[in-house]
Amino acid sequence: MRTLTAHLKQNVHLIQQRFHTKDAIRSLSVTIGLDIHAELLYLPNTVDEQKIHSFLLAPIQQLVKQSVTYDQLGSIFKDGEPSVAYTVEECVDGLVNGRALLMFNKEEGYLFNCSNWRVRSVEVPLSSSVYEGPASGLTEDISVNLNLLRNYYRSPNLVIETLSIGSEAKKEISILSVHGVSNPAIVEEVKARLNNINVSQAIINQLATDALEGDGLLFPRTMSIDRPDACAMALAAGRVVILVDGSPLALLAPSIFYHFFQNQDDYLSDFGKFGSRPLRYSYFFIATFTPAIIVAIERFHLDLIPRDLHEQLIKTHDTLAPFTIELLFVILLMQVIMDGSYRLPGNVIFAVTFIGTMLISDVATDVNLFHPVTIVIIGICYISSFPVLHRGLLSPIFFMRLSFIILAHFFGFAGLFLGTTVLLILMAKLHSIGTPYLYPFLPFQPDKWKDTLFRGGLQRVINHPNPLPFNRHQAKANRKQHI
């Protein structure tokens, strides 16, 4: 790293060189007291000039015709979170992060937080609404998000550590844990994985997710959420919260299978104590296995159902395609409609979905392209997948649904049994930050089930959360080596 020199003009030149054009940085020559010459540098459009006047220029104006020494500067500038920079890299990083830089004929400079990033104000969470409860959601400003979490978790034991990723375009990441509650080994593993990110431009927030999830297939090993109250509950349970500057979603780690069936509603209503989670597990099973079960029956076990039911519901000889092909085609068609609804402008979503449903339900059945039972089965699958709360599970459900249909078509229930066995083995081998993915079901520990299938009493859940096991060797082996 290049250190600053004792010559003001040379320091300014070193900083300007890093930005390649003179117009990139604005500079203002000022005199502090009688004889301290200084240069104020900042990037336009990233700072609030009123803050510059309040934090820097106003105190300087009060020192006109007064004798000031360098040792007194620390007591003169008190606002704006002043920090000392000793290298050119520290100065450049401060400037690109919305800080103003005050430089002298000295081997150090002062950085002041005068940032003015344009972000959304605190609004209702966009991706995780609840029936009742707090209505504040995270934003793209990491300082606002930290403020919200400090508000929900008011404890001196809340530990916030900050690091940055990217060698050129950097992004700030805050790691939140609770001293005495979070496993220190898990916190260290989270920091190690984030520090392992080696990119020049940290523009995409998904970099943090990929680093935290490590090696593994299909199932998500981190959970993203935009509710600060849910983040506070995760902290109370010993999990780690990761905030990425520019992202309105917090990452929760470790995130294992049963975490994806929890919702903040479970802790805000009596129904969540007994009814919600078993239903969500049932919805997951229905959305994943129903088409494959119907295919297995239609292919190999038609003789086991009443003949009248067979003729009315399962017959497919009147349609243009075999039953399995119908299912796969309708699934893909529904996926096209759903993906398009996420990306189309709001004023055309209704028209596209209306046309799509008419195409599937009326036209396709009238011309015998699809059997009505096919539409009913796929409708049940997609409707039952909506209550599966976390969108990260929707992709695994989609790929498992297709895979099980193919297995059922060729091998019937034997194929379903074999596919489910392989799936459970793969899930059992998964780890999230060194925590077994199917814990506490595998390894089998029924005494740790108090907040999994059902939500226990709130006082017990908060005061005695399930401890998350950690395997250091497995965590290191699971890291991604190249991000």
Image (cartoon, rainbow, N blue to C red):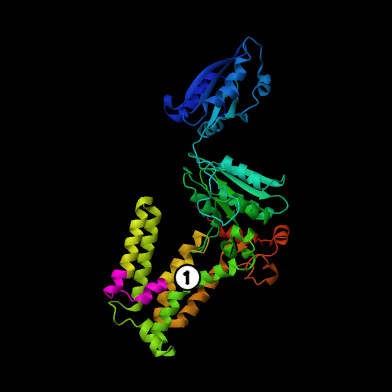
Dot 1 lies on which element?
A: helix
Depth check: give the residue in front, 257 or 264. Answer: 264
**Above or below for 106 versus 131:** above
Q: Which amino acid does label 1 sit on?
A: Ala
**In the rendered structure, does residue 200 fall within the stretch colored magenta?**
no
Left or right of residue 404, residue 352 in this image: left
Depth check: give the residue in front, 89 or 94. Answer: 94
Q: Which residue lies furthest to the top in this view?
A: 65
Left or right of residue 436, residue 366 in this image: left
Q: Give the range drawn in magenta.
A: 362-378
Q: Name the dominant secondary structure of the magenta segment.
A: helix
Q: Where is residue 212 in the image (x, y as percent from the top left)?
A: 55, 54
- The answer to whether one can see residue 5 in this image is no
**In the rendered structure, does residue 375 fall within the stretch colored magenta?**
yes
* Residue under the point 67% across and 46% down: 159
* Residue under the point 48% across and 68% down: 384
Q: Which residue lies furthest to the left in this view?
A: 367
- The answer to whether one can see residue 435 in this image is yes
